[in-house]
Amino acid sequence: MGDSQVGCADGEAIWALHRALEDAKDVVALTGAGISAESGIPVFRGPGGLWRTYSPLQLASPEAFERDPRLVWEWYDWRRQLSRKAKPNAGHIALAQLERKIIDGGARSFTLVSQNVDGLHDRAGSRNVLKLHGDLWFTRCTACGEVKRNDQTPLPELPPKCKCGGLLRPNVVWFGEPLPQDAWTQAVEATCRARVFLVIGTSATVFPAAGLAHEARQAKAKVAVINTEATELDSTAAWVLRGPAGEILPRLL
Ligand code: OAD
């Protein structure tokens, strides 16, 4: 455990992290499914997690899509409907406010890197989200490659087709696929500069995204873990704030 680390979200730790956020020139936040849990969107691992009921390889891989595009699209169409009904929670909103506060304050930077595809950071008002695993609200044509926003829920035809006749796929990253190059490069650059690195609502077990937190630690950033449960990063973090992101993040502003 680091010197300033505590095991729960007590006032002193919140205050110390608040001050570090005020002072740091460059701040990065990495979010995962846990930040959307309070909006009613299930996480992937642990109790009630999507991967307890569904198999990633049958629903979130290029092979699965090749085998049964309709089945894969049914799952994504369901997740689109869930995300559409959900509202950004206090955690998403606090991160959008933190971005404004830091960026509008002048020569400082704030970078939000998310593994989530639900679009809730955008709807909360975050201006610049680096989406490492893509976005549920965009499709990509498997024939002509066109990437296009699509807000229809539910989709009228499964699997949906492009105007060129090709099969559309969700513009998300599946197991075995590389991350979007631009977003990844920007995320790595921001991480190397970061003085404070927030790890919020992620089990930090899926690489390469999870590797950013380790990279940040090596680059001497102070890492803060905000999670309802223990994570593998806790032992090297400067702060571990245990509790729901929707309760902790607004207290950091
Ligand atoms: P996980 O489901 O692995 O982890 C969610 C984390 O959120 C867990 O550590 C929970 O303890 C924590 N958590 C739950 N509710 C919370 C709350 N209210 N506040 C704070 N923390 C909370 O989700 P990810 O880490 O996002 O990838 O998973 C990473 C990737 O694995 C996903 O992007 C997805 C998945 O397979 C792909 O589909 C490519």
Image (cartoon, rainbow, N blue to C red):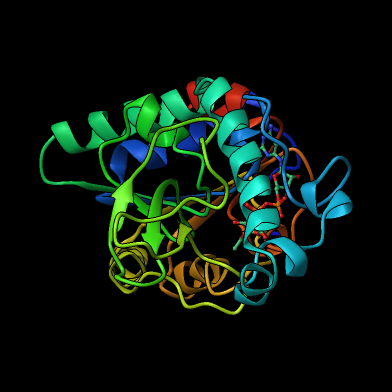
Spot occupied by residue 41 in the image (x, y as percentages of width and height): 67, 33
* 229 displayed left or right of 78: right
Measuring from the top left, give residue 47's x and y in whole percent: 89, 43
Q: Residue at x 19, y 38 (%)?
A: 103
Quadrant housing the N terminus: bottom right
In the rendering, at what x and y percent does residue 197 appear? 45, 54
49 lies above or below 186: above
Residue lying furthest left: 106
Can residue 5 be spotted in the picture?
no
The answer to which image quadrant residue 121 occupies is top left
Q: Is residue 194 visible?
A: yes
Specify whether 99 is left or right of 224.
left
Answer left or right for 18 relative to 207.
left
Foreground of the two, 136 or 201 = 136
Q: Nearer the viewer, residue 156 or 98?
A: 156
- In the rendered picture of this protein, how many numbered marks are placed on residues? 0
Outermost residue on the front side: it is: 165
Q: Is residue 178 above or below residue 124?
A: below
Q: Which quadrant of the figure contains the C terminus? A: top left
Residue at the spot 43% in from the left edge and 23% down from the top edge: 93
Residue 150: percent from the left, percent from the top? Answer: 37, 40
Q: Nearer the viewer, residue 237 or 177?
A: 177
Q: Residue at x 28, y 66 (%)?
A: 186
Is residue 157 found left or right of 22 in the rendered image?
Answer: right
- When the figure is inspected, residue 127 is found, relative to residue 138, above or below; the finding is above
Q: Residue at position x 70%, y 55% from top?
A: 71
